[in-house]
Amino acid sequence: MIFDAQPTLIGDLLQLRPLEADDYENLYAVASDPLIWEQHPASDRYQQEVFQKFFQDAMESGGALLAIDHKTNAVIGSSRYHGFNATTSEVEIGWTFLARSHWGGRYNGEMKRLMLQHAFQYVDSVIFLIGPENIRSQRAVERIGGVRDGSRTDASGMESWLYRIRAAEYRL
């Protein structure tokens, strides 16, 4: 079965749909808040030239999703599937950010629940790679059942902590 990395997923609070080139301005309006990125390894992502590269990478990834608030129909952030591996039966969820107005767990929780439910139709395990200093994201992943399972270093030498959720252990 081929992994569908850009589904449309609908929950009670939000809708996730494939990211499109026309979404840039609305998504940058959210991402331009420096406080969103203060604990992130790319803490300068609020700067337009840095965000343009992030957005282009998201478009090229084939796995980026735009988050839209059902109540207001406003763009509130994005997330991404990455690195589907049929051999190890895993995929990564990452590059997630939300407008501060939507922090506090409900929206992030629903976003991750929708993405996990979709992913577990294809894989046995979902991983999250989080910077060691990004305590906010670590706690958010732990709240949805993520367990720290080592670390990974990328090609640029940046270390991330690896969190994992296994389908067999996942509770809705």
Image (spheres, rainbow, N blue to C red):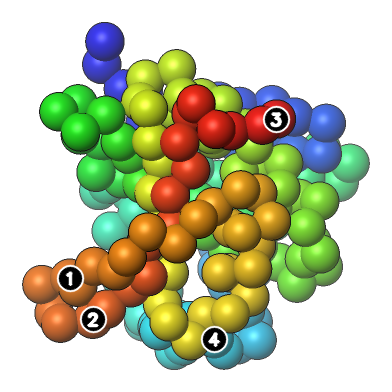
Q: Residue at x 65, y 43 (%)?
A: 111
Q: CA distance from mark 3 to mark 2?
A: 32 Å
Placement of 32 over or under 90, stated as above or below? below
Rendered-image quadrant of the C terminus: top right
Secondary structure beneath dot 4 equals: loop
Residue 116 percent across, percent down from the top left: 54, 34
Secondary structure beneath dot 2 equals: loop
Q: CA distance from mark 2 to mark 4?
A: 15 Å
In the image, what residue type sits under mark 4?
Gln
Q: CA distance from mark 4 to mark 1?
A: 18 Å
Secondary structure beneath dot 1 equals: loop
In the image, what residue type sits under mark 1?
Asp
Q: Earlier in the sequence, mark 4 or mark 1?
A: 4
Q: Nearer the viewer, residue 34 or 20?
A: 34
Q: Nearer the viewer, mark 3 or mark 4?
A: 3
Q: CA distance from mark 3 to mark 1?
A: 31 Å
User: Which residue in the structure is indicated by mark 1?
Assistant: 154
Q: CA distance from mark 2 to mark 1?
A: 5 Å
User: Which residue in the structure is indicated by mark 2?
Assistant: 158
Check if mark 2's residue and mark 1's residue have beta carbons within 8 Å: yes
Check if mark 4's residue and mark 1's residue have beta carbons within 8 Å: no
Q: Residue at x 75, y 72 (%)?
A: 100
User: Which residue in the structure is indicated by mark 4?
Assistant: 39
Q: Mark 3: few, some, or many residues within 10 Å (few <14, many ≥20)?
A: few
Q: Mark 1: few, some, or many residues within 10 Å (few <14, many ≥20)?
A: few
Number of the label disc, if any, that sits on residue 172: 3
